[in-house]
Amino acid sequence: MSAAAISLSYEDVVSGDCLCALIVPAQALDEPGYIKGVSAAGSSSKHEFHALAQTAYYQFQDDELKVELTRAPLEIECDDVHELVESGMVIYRDEQGSIRAVAHQGLNLRKLLEAANRFCTRWIRLDI
């Protein structure tokens, strides 16, 4: 794992090769302001997050994105960022450029991906 990589852990899984991640808590279905982006590069390019959200959404629709399911909290760490997601989804890009996602069981995955895509699209268009 590089010094600036994002670490995502849950259950016995630890992934330290995340380049950027979108944190989409279940609360985002009702209020999109809860969605957060984390980038290992230190830049917070809204275009990077928009591409991540949009591609993940389209890949899911085409059955190309297999979301890993868990019951454990999702822990995201990078530099001074430490987030714990008790219910929700994390969408991320790994060092090979692949888009991956992990979410809590029982949630509507399509709705969470739609919320992330919609939030990032508005962020780009409205510069919120």
Image: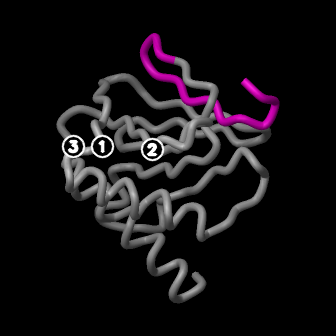
Horizontal side of residue 36 vs 57, given as left or right:
right
Question: 72 or 51: which is nearer to us?
Answer: 51
Residue 68, image quadrant: top left
Q: Which residues are magenta?
A: 1-13
Crowd band around label 2 with a 10 angstrom C-alpha radius: few (<14), some (14–19), many (20+):
many
Q: What's under tag 2, amino acid-wise?
A: Ile
Residue 39 x, y percent position in the rendering: 67, 50
- The Cα–Cα distance between marks 3 and 1, rounded to whole angstroms, is 16 Å
In the picture, the quarter occupied by the C terminus is: bottom right
Q: Which residue is mark 3?
A: 107
Q: Secondary structure at mark 2?
A: strand
Q: Earlier in the sequence, mark 3 or mark 1?
A: 1
Q: Residue visible at 18% across and 37% down?
A: 106
Inspect the magenta stretch and tell me whether residue 79 lies in it: no
Q: Is residue 39 above or below residue 127?
A: above
| Residue named by callout 1 | 65
**SS category of the residue bearing label 1:** loop
